[in-house]
Amino acid sequence: MSTRRAPAPDEVRSALADVTAWVDARPDGPAADDAVPAPPRAVRSTAVRVSLAALEHIAPGRSVEVRVPPFGAVHCVDGPRHTRGTPPNVVETDPRTWCALALGRLGFDDAVAAGVVRASGHRAPRVGHWLPLAGTAPDTESDTDPDTGADDDVDPDPGTAAGSVPDRAADAAW
């Protein structure tokens, strides 16, 4: 479990809202678009860091490392903990693509297939289950956590910090 505080849902929505126009103006990837310039570095950094912190809290664990250089990296997803060297389960992408995933503008599997997200290791694809974090409603065909088989609607310990970030079932309110 992370020692960082869980961001409030409004904080996640606000940070991602600040980059939405930039994300939406570039539907095919991080190609230049003069009509909608990239937000200032501080705005992009905040959107990435806050959304990574949200992921870290809704998908607790240390078996997958999610990297969004140059702004941040977190460990998430329950499973065997990695302690030394290069982790066996890594998800890496650029800031615009990460924000598109967090907003639901791009599906995880589609991003991997297009080559804009690099996912290595057998647990890395599980990150896609926890996306999007805000914006477009997630695919709700399965409300089951792929790691435990438990229903996502049930918070196993409502007194934990993880309970302060809505789970995927509550994303419709985000």
Image (spheres, grey):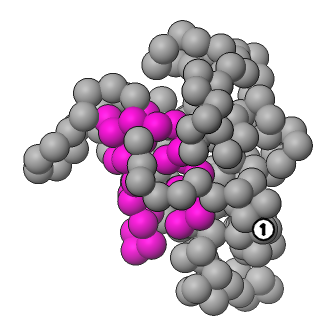
Q: Is residue 42 left or right of residue 13?
A: left
Instruction: Measuring from the top left, give residue 105's x and y in whole percent.
Output: 74, 51
Q: Is residue 164 above or below residue 99?
A: above
Kindly indicate the quadrant of the structure image that contains residue 82: top left
Q: Residue at x 56, y 38 (%)?
A: 160
Instruction: Measuring from the top left, give residue 25's x and y in whole percent.
Output: 77, 70
- Please say whether residue 6 is visible from this viewpoint: yes
Mark 1 = which residue? Answer: 14
Q: Which residues are magenta?
A: 49-77
Kindly indicate the quadrant of the structure image that contains residue 90: top left
Q: Is residue 155 magenta?
A: no
Q: Residue furthest front?
A: 159
Q: Is residue 49 left or right of residue 137?
A: left
* Crowding near the residue tagged with mark 1, few <14, some 14–19, many ≥20 C-alpha atoms within 10 Å: some
Q: Is residue 126 above or below residue 40?
A: above
Q: Which quadrant does the N terminus fall into?
A: top left
Which is nearer the eye, 22 or 172?
A: 172
Q: Residue furthest top?
A: 149
Q: Is residue 133 above or below residue 39?
A: above
Tell me the amino acid under the disc marked 1: Ser
Instruction: Measuring from the top left, give residue 19's x and y in whole percent.
Output: 72, 72
Q: Is residue 135 above or below residue 169?
A: below
Q: Residue at x 54, y 10 (%)?
A: 149
Q: Is residue 9 left or right of residue 82?
A: right
Q: Residue at x 16, y 43 (%)?
A: 83
Which is nearer the eye, 66 or 29?
A: 66
Q: Is residue 76 magenta?
A: yes
- Please say whether residue 98 is visible from this viewpoint: no
Instruction: Measuring from the top left, give residue 11's x and y in whole percent.
Output: 73, 64
Q: How many marks?
A: 1
Q: Residue at x 77, y 23 (%)?
A: 140
Secondary element under disc 1, as helix, strand or loop, is helix
